[in-house]
Amino acid sequence: MKGSGLLEGVDFALDEMPGDQLHRILHAYRERGPIQSTRFLGLPALIITSHQALSRAFMDTESFPPHAMYQASFEGAIGKSFISMEDPKEHLLYRKRVTPAFRSRAVARYERDDLAEIAHELIDRIESRTSFDLVESFTTQFPYLVISRLLGLPRDREDEFQNWAFALLRFRDDPAAAKNAREKLTEFISPVVEDRKKQPRNDVISELLQVRIDDMSLTDEEIHSHIRLLFPTGGETTHGSLGNLLFAALSNQSLWERLCRDPSLIPAACEESLRWETPIAVLPRLSCSDETEFLGITIPGNSWILFAMAAANRDPLVFSEPDRFDLDREKDESLTFGRGVKACPGMHLARKNMTVALQVLTERMPSLQLTDLDSAQPRRTVLRSPAALHVRK
Ligand code: HEM
């Protein structure tokens, strides 16, 4: 059977699958058929790899209720936010009312001026050095500074804010530290919320305070949980997408030089990077509680179903020469931001973050060179990114 050696013992939660290894594995699964048996967290799972099947699976919310995984894995740390709401009507209502805050005037202003300012600030800190790790000094920090500034938090405590956000995200590894971080974040953000109630500003907290659901404002706890929601959804994903973009650009010297010479190619490079090496390579869903059927396959109740966006994004039936990083692809058919009721409401900000970061980096540091290709290979699947990007100037 095709790819059987390669696929033996594969576990999408436990294996790192660096660089091309993930894509060889996903191609091998897809060649066997659009939905195949695999493992996740040591448990039996099914993986969906073809573009057509995955587009259908995103829309089949009866078989694959989209809130269930978030309820099981996020709610303990984040609290109740629309991402984990079970009732589709309630989810839609909150999503409709709350997400404009992520695309609001506050965000538009940030796009224009402040994203570039953040990128410049981070580069100022490393400019005098000849070698550094871009993951440590840039891709890890950039998204959290963006969130902190969007929220309008005090600038002199941004480092503390970032450390609490990281601790909260590690809630599975260290629940006590996450609990402590959540309390600290609440203590830190509460006075800002109180201040914005009295004097609204042009920031996301002020926008959240204006939200009305059935004529009622969000409770303070809802404001806090929707702020916390930004860490995994806006922070971790952007961290991954920046790392993968810089890996794509810096591991191909002629591409990097082309982008430095002609910055008008940068938006196309960001788009292609989101297809070629997406930060959510595999999105785990839990199936509905009863046994169901999808594409003629029996799906056991409450089982792991892996939505392999990284595989759909390299499906040869949709993308010609799918493994090639190609700046000239015309249509964006990637499934990077999902489809249907949960399609990513932050995709505009995500694209903007990447474009601005790459513009500033190519402008300020055109002579960058990767010095360790191994550690720069994107790794892991649910959140995929390089462990390090060691470079010299
Ligand atoms: C490159 C970066 C990003 C990627 C690849 C990404 C990807 C995704 C995907 C695939 C989904 C759908 C999940 C599902 O079907 O279960 C999603 C949902 C979501 N994303 Fe993003 N995202 C990114 C950036 C952002 C940013 C910057 C924000 C916030 C400003 C954001 C906020 C959200 C939220 C709140 C949801 C949940 C939507 C819902 O429950 O209806 N994302 N994202």
Image (tube, helix red, strand yellow):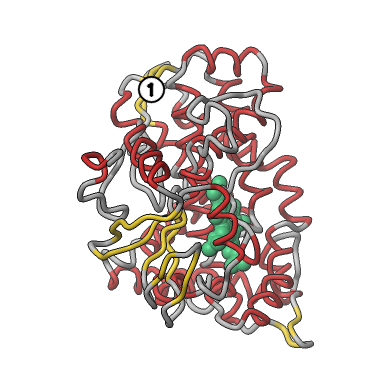
Please tell me which residue lies in front, 84 or 216. Answer: 84
> Where residue 267 sits: x, y (%)?
67, 31
In the image, residue 364 above or below residue 378: above
Name the residue at 48% across, 29% down: 323
In the image, residue 315 above or below residue 339: above
Give the amino acid at mark 1: Val
Image quadrant occupied by the N terminus: top left
Q: Which quadrant would residue 38 be assigned to in this image?
A: bottom left
> Where residue 5 sits: x, y (%)?
21, 40
> Where residue 110 sits: x, y (%)?
70, 47
In the image, residue 244 above or below residue 38: above
Name the residue at 66% across, 48% down: 349
Around disc 1, counting alpha carbons within 10 Å, would you say few (fewer than 14), some (14 to 19), or many (20 or more)? some
> Where residue 166 sits: x, y (%)?
39, 57
Residue at numbered disc 1: 391
Image quadrant occupied by the C terminus: top left
**SS under mark 1:** strand
Q: Is residue 15 visible?
A: yes
Q: How many marks?
A: 1
Name the residue at 63% across, 73% down: 193
Using residue 57 as the reference point, say whether residue 28 is left or right of it: left
Please tell me which residue lies in front, 374 or 128. Answer: 374
Using residue 359 as the reference point, say whether residue 211 is left or right of it: right
Name the residue at 58% across, 24% down: 326
In the image, residue 133 above or below residue 102: above
Please tell me which residue lies in front, 339 or 353. Answer: 339
Label 1 beta carbon within 8 A of ligand 1: no
Q: Is residue 148 visible?
A: no
- Rendered-image quarter of ligand 1: bottom right
